[in-house]
Image (tube, rainbow, N blue to C red):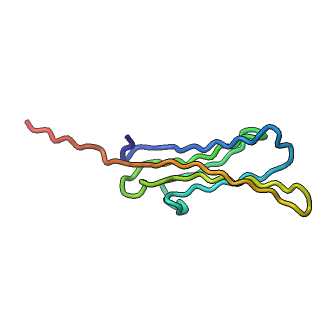
Amino acid sequence: ALYAGTPLTLTCNITLDDLVDIPVIVTKQWTRDLMNITEPNITETFIQTDTNHYITTLDFYSLSAVYDNGEYKCTVLVTANTDDNYTASIINDASTDVVVEDPEIINFTS
């Protein structure tokens, strides 16, 4: 279970086929319930680790049961200009549901 107040990192790995030997542009977009993510407690990173491998993460510093529940989707667009008159693009995505619960408070009596 995911609890409010704890951190979470979602990761999307992008690996291009080794046969891709032309320059490409790789872009990404994270959404929650099909909306752009704008919360200040969430940070996005996007790095290229080698020629055909990219990693993007969505880091939550402190989960909120009120704001952070939903379906998170990482959408990746790979674009290549094959010549002056043609551009090839491929879109792919992956998603996961995030359900945040408030921590259980146990009352102690003496």
In the picture as drawn, the residue positioned furthest to the right comes out as 84
Residue under the point 80% across and 51% down: 24
Q: In the rendering, at what x and y percent does residue 54 appear?
A: 69, 43
Answer with the quarter of the image where residue 18 lies: top right
Q: On the rendered image, what quadrant is the N terminus found in?
A: top left
Residue most extreme to the left: 110
Residue name at image x 58 percent, y 55 percent: 30
Point out residue 62 in the picture as x, y percentages from the top left corner. Answer: 42, 48
Q: Does residue 56 lie above or below 79 as drawn?
A: above
Quadrant location of the C terminus in the rendered image? top left
Q: Residue at x 53, y 61 (%)?
A: 34
Identify which residue, 83 or 28, lies in the foreground.
Answer: 83
Residue 59 lies left or right of residue 99; in this view the side is right
**Front residue of this view, candidates 34 and 50:** 34
The quadrant holding residue 48 is top right
Where's residue 40, x and y in %?
49, 58
Classify residue 68 as left or right of residue 82: left
Residue 61, horizontal then vertical, whole percent: 47, 48
At a point 68% along the width and 43% down the height, the residue shown is: 14
